[in-house]
Image (tube, rainbow, N blue to C red):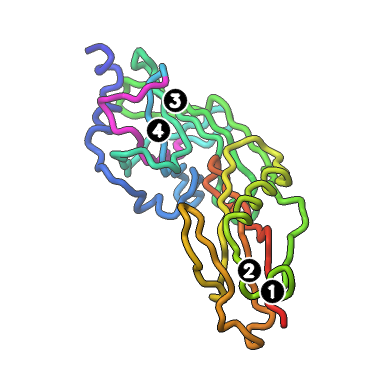
Amino acid sequence: MYFKKRFGIFLLLMFVVPVSNAQGNVWSGLKRTQYDSAASTLRIPCAVLKGEDGNSLPEFAPAYALNLFLLNAEIENILFRLADPIQAFDVTPESCLDTLTLASDGSSVTYETMSAEIDSDAMANADRFYTLELQAELGGSAIDFSVVSAESRNYTRPFYNAEIMEGYPPLRPFYADYVYDDLYIDAGYSSLGENLVVYEPGRIVFNCFYSDPDNLLEVVEVVGNNTRYRLKSSVDMADYGKTFSVNCTIFNQDLNRLEDTVPIFTWFIVF
């Protein structure tokens, strides 16, 4: 009972908010937390709620979208107030980056992010991000967060440091009946693993696939998960200079951002 009384206003706010599977309204389009300068509000599209022991809290939804209004901008006493709207998720989105941690005695709640940005920076400097820790004491009539720590960093994107490999079908060895399959997909993953230069540790994932914008390929067969292609018999001089490729995307899960799409292998039609 003591625990519930201490953060009663928090309970009330979190219990009555609408539940949704998707972001909406003021958070629409946000990939990460962003400070909205015009509204003086920190827009948080998703924060996982957990206890101090790291476990989920069965009394609450697993994650929330929040708004923290800048109540006081004095550098020595910056305060953010939890404000409407608040939105609950019935399932935690895979893209959820931030955390809310409730103290075990119910006395405080801590918000943490490593990927916040300011809207003006997002336009002028897309690689500047902020690590924030904010904390609010519970038990009052409002939930006001003070700044525990705040640091900025200039992020350097990873890049592929290798030559793009080229082929020229139907010249050898890529004759008209040559089959393109997972051999090149697997080689793409391998080449990224060997040649991607990363400046900041994080969760970087790759996805390699055939890209055929000019519709030059046709499926020969599918063996398990291996889809095999070859040039269409209709490809001729009219297709001279057109291309297809094995592209690999580089996605940073810590920022919810596609960093690059690299054409590891590119084939140019020549006759």
Q: Nearer the viewer, residue 263 or 269?
A: 269
* Whether residue 246 is situated above or below residue 206 in the rendered picture: below
Q: CA distance from mark 4 to mark 1?
A: 51 Å
The local crowd at label 2, few if under 14, some if 14 to 19, many if 20 or more residues have their Cα within 10 Å, is some
* Whether residue 183 is situated above or below residue 271 in the rendered picture: above
Which label number is shown at residue 110?
Answer: 3
Please state which amino acid type lies under the numbered disc 1: Pro
Residue on which the image places disc 4: 48
Q: Which residues are magenta?
A: 54-71
Q: CA distance from mark 1 to mark 2?
A: 9 Å
Asked which secondary structure carries label 4, the reply is: strand
Specify which label sits upstream in the sequence, 3 or 4.
Answer: 4
Which label number is shown at residue 178?
Answer: 2
Magenta-span inclusion, residue 68: yes
Q: Is residue 43 visible?
A: yes
Mark toward the viewer: 3 or 4: 4
Residue 218: x and y in percent read 51, 72
* Whether residue 29 is situated above or below residue 71 in the rendered picture: below
Tell me if label 4 and label 1 are in contact, CB under 8 Å.
Answer: no
Q: Is residue 157 visible?
A: no
Residue on which the image places disc 1: 169
